[in-house]
Image (cartoon, grey):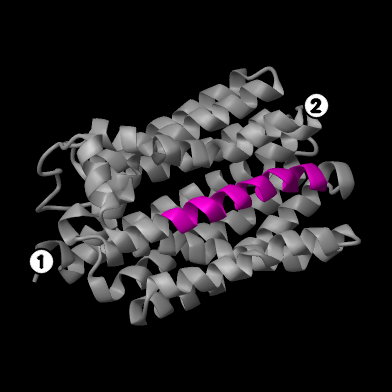
Amino acid sequence: MDGNWAPSRVRRNFRIDTFSAICGGVYIAVLVTFMPIVVRRLGGSTTDVAIVIAAPFVGHLLSPLSTYLLMGFPQVRVVAGTVTVARATFLAGVLVAATPLMLAMTTVVSFVIGIANISAYTALMQGIYPDRERASAMANVRIGGAIAGIAAAAVAGTFIDVIPAAWVFAAAALIGLPGALAFFWVRYDGSAKVVARRSLAVISRDVWADHKYRRLLLSFTVFGIGNLMNVAVYPILLVDHFNASNSFIGAMTAVSSATMIVAYLVWGRMIDRGSSIRLTLLITVVTLLIPIGYIAAADVWLLIPVAIVGGIVNAGGEITFFTNIVQIAPRDRIGEYAT
């Protein structure tokens, strides 16, 4: 048996992973829920809001370069180090930002740094969790993050109405930092380093030659562009059209996070027993209900069902993003496929 999959080590890493997810859940819930709303309420343009929404996508777009630069470093240090730097950067940035555009750019920079570890993280998840338990373990970890997100969204939605938003964002980053630092204590032996550094051109050519993965990438690209256009509009609709309060927006996120708890359990078991790719198709179809819900909603309270659907698809999408790669990629090239 792989020493990394020894029961005692798996349990230890799972506890650390869960603690990191709880701290990260607070940080992400506050950032993702309220940053575009705050930018808009402070007088930010639609472009400023779009910059905030696009931040994770910019991070993924630049991740191949980050992966290449970080090859050869221990994966645990890459994951923990990038997340720590990202949250520290966000903490400093929100405290000095004086305009909506500065807040938006701070968000972009923090996501670019944080997502730089995507290759190392994906390979690490394959290394520290056994095959038959991986999706369930990752789902249970994310349940902890979702529970933390419920509390964080509700509390932040209340406080952001009475104190400066920068303080709320800074507090979320401070809570997120211990989780990032704790990840340094994850134990992973064996192929803890990338065997050899290959050029981006060679990696791209070899990955592109995998016809099954190529089709997946193309479908994700087309769907992702369309979905990004929709997601950029939602915060503007909440502020300008529905005139939703910060407390209500926090409640929407709490409902979505609560839904994710159940969805993580269901999706995790389905992936462990079947195909991650087939589940991705189902999630993609269900995602179409979100823009339809915004179009059909005649009142702000009718967005609650949209939040429930959002929780279902977000939970599935977050898990399948990693499990698709683990199921498709050759075991020794998971990191390359993740870029």
Q: Residue at x 9, y 53 (%)?
A: 190
274 shown above or below 10: below
Q: Within 10 Å of the Cα at label 2, are there few (<14), some (14-19), or many (20+) other Cα atoms?
A: few
Pick the residue in front: 164 or 321. Answer: 321
265 shown above or below 55: below
**Magenta stretch, residue numbers:** 218-238
Quadrant of the image containing the N terminus: bottom left
Instruction: Give the image location of residue 140, x and y in percent.
Output: 42, 68
Amino acid type of the residue that numbered disc 2 sits on in the rendered structure: Gly
| Left or right: 270 in relation to 194 | right
Tag count? 2
Numbered circle sitting on residue 43: 2
Q: Which residue is mark 1?
A: 2
Magenta-drawn stretch, dominant element (helix, strand or loop) = helix
Instruction: Give the image location of residue 146, x and y in percent.
Output: 54, 60
Q: Residue at x 62, y 64 (%)?
A: 287
Instruction: Give the image location of residue 195, x and y in percent.
Output: 10, 44
Q: Is residue 227 magenta?
A: yes
Pick the residue in front: 133 or 27. Answer: 133
Amino acid type of the residue that numbered disc 1 sits on in the rendered structure: Asp
Do we see residue 163 in this rendering?
Answer: no
Q: Residue at x 49, y 50 (%)?
A: 221
Instruction: Give the image location of residue 142, x and y in percent.
Output: 46, 61
Q: Residue at x 73, y 64 (%)?
A: 306
Pick the residue in front: 250 or 123. Answer: 123
Quadrant of the image containing the C terminus: top left
